Image (spheres, rainbow, N blue to C red):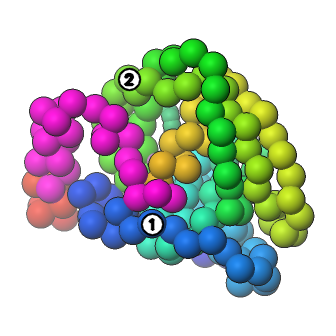
């Protein structure tokens, strides 16, 4: 297992669309293990492969209090439903910024697990928000894209300056 480095907005590589995984083989399982280790260490409640510069449709999530319920979604397909709800979101690729984002309350997911086995899941609450946030990443979208141009520009300029100093 190894820690992966997380790309930071406005890195253009975060805009790369992830491609479907053809076969869930040992290399993909190793990627999942590294992503879980990286997510727990960060710490975060989710991580998408494009955040660690791998353009594959792989997501890991753990929204449990005890941080011991990892969930893996490979090639996820989602359908959103229900009313719009606003949640304060953050992102490991947008460190230090938390802003309200409006999304749909429920999500139905079809995906493959770490063994390559198909499964379905219905979620609401934080898990639903996190799944929608991670599926945005796989499309090259970030939570800042849901904010006003003014807010996004301010965040971009602050993070660019920070990056220039490190
Ligand atoms: O750790 C994270 N917290 C979070 C809080 C509210 C809504 C979404 C998230 S996901 C984020 C980790 C991350 O950046 N995943 O892509
Ligand atoms: Ni994120």
**Residue 160 in view here:** yes
> Few, some or many C-alpha atoms within 10 Å of disc 1 (few <14, some 14-19, many ≥20)?
some
Q: What's the residue at 44%, 31% (across, down)?
A: 89
Q: Residue 36 in magenta? A: no
Query: Over which residues does the magenta segment extend?
Result: 138-160
Q: Up-down: is 52 above or below 134?
A: below
Which quadrant is the N terminus positioned in?
bottom right
Q: What's the residue at 43%, 24% (across, down)?
A: 102
Q: Secondary structure at mark 2?
A: strand
How far, Cα to Cα, is label 1 from label 2? 24 Å
Say the numbered circle drawn on residue 100. Answer: 2
Which quadrant is the C terminus positioned in?
bottom left
The quadrant in which residue 2 appears is bottom right
Residue 91 at x, y = what percent? 42, 44
Q: What's the residue at 44%, 72% (across, down)?
A: 53
Give the left or right position of residue 7, taking residue 73 as reference.
Answer: left
For marks 1 and 2 on the same chain, the one whose residue lies earlier in the sequence: 1
Say the numbered circle drawn on residue 17. Answer: 1
Total labels: the figure holds 2
> Does the magenta stretch mainly form a helix, a strand or a loop?
helix
Q: Nearer the viewer, mark 1 or mark 2?
A: 1
Q: Up-down: is 125 above or below 40?
A: above
Give the left or right position of residue 117, taking residue 101 as reference.
Answer: right
Q: Secondary structure at mark 1?
A: loop
């Amino acid at each position: 297992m190894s820690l992966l480095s997380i790309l930071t907005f406005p890195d253009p590589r975060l805009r790369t669309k992830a491609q479907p995984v053809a076969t869930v083989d040992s290399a993909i399982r190793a990627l999942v293990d590294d992503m879980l280790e990286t997510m727990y260490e960060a710490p975060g409640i989710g991580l998408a492969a494009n955040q660690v510069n791998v353009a594959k449709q792989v997501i890991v999530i753990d929204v449990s209090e005890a941080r011991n319920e990892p969930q893996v979604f490979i090639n996820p397909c989602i359908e959103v439903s229900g009313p719009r709800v606003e949640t304060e979101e953050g992102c490991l690729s947008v460190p230090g910024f938390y802003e309200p984002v409006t999304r749909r309350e429920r999500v139905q997911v079809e995906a493959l697990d770490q063994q390559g086995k198909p499964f379905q899941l219905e979620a609401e609450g934080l898990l639903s928000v996190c799944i929608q946030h991670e599926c945005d990443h796989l499309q090259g979208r970030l939570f800042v894209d849901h904010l006003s141009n003014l807010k996004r520009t301010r965040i971009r300029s602050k993070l660019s300056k920070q990056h220039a100093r490190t």
